[in-house]
Amino acid sequence: MPKFKPHTGTGKRVKITGRGRVLTEQSGKRHLLEGKSSRRTRRQSGNASMAKVDVKRVLRLLGR
């Protein structure tokens, strides 16, 4: 049987809560921040729960 190797890149970008929800950072806060208002970047901070359609794919990448 081959070794089990989960996708390490996905593991760095995603956090799974105790109840099984998948959290990830909101998009749009990495670069070009000077052109975005402080209000906009402030609202993009923090974690957001992942869309339900993507959860199955992410959990399979992590081997859950």
Image (cartoon, helix red, strand yellow):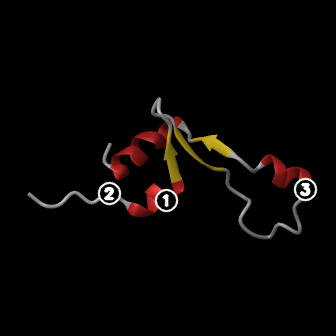
Q: Which residue is mark 1?
A: 12
Disc 2 crowd rating (10 Å Cα; few below 14, some 14-19, many 20+) is: some
Tell me the SS state at disc 2: loop
Could you say which is closer to the camera, residue 11 or residue 33?
11
Which kind of residue does numbered mark 3 sit on? Answer: Ser
Left or right: 23 as drawn, with respect to 2: right
Quadrant assignment for the N terminus: bottom left
Q: Name the N-terminal-most of marks 3 and 1.
A: 1
Image point 46% across, 41% down: which residue? 55
Quadrant of residue 2 in the image?
Answer: bottom left
Q: Which residue is mark 2?
A: 6
Farthest-out residue, front: 18
Could you say which is closer to the camera, residue 18 or residue 23?
18
Q: CA distance from mark 1 to mark 2?
A: 11 Å
* Vertical order, 62 against 18 (above or below): below
Q: Name the N-terminal-most of marks 1 and 2.
A: 2
Which kind of residue does numbered mark 2 sit on? Answer: Pro
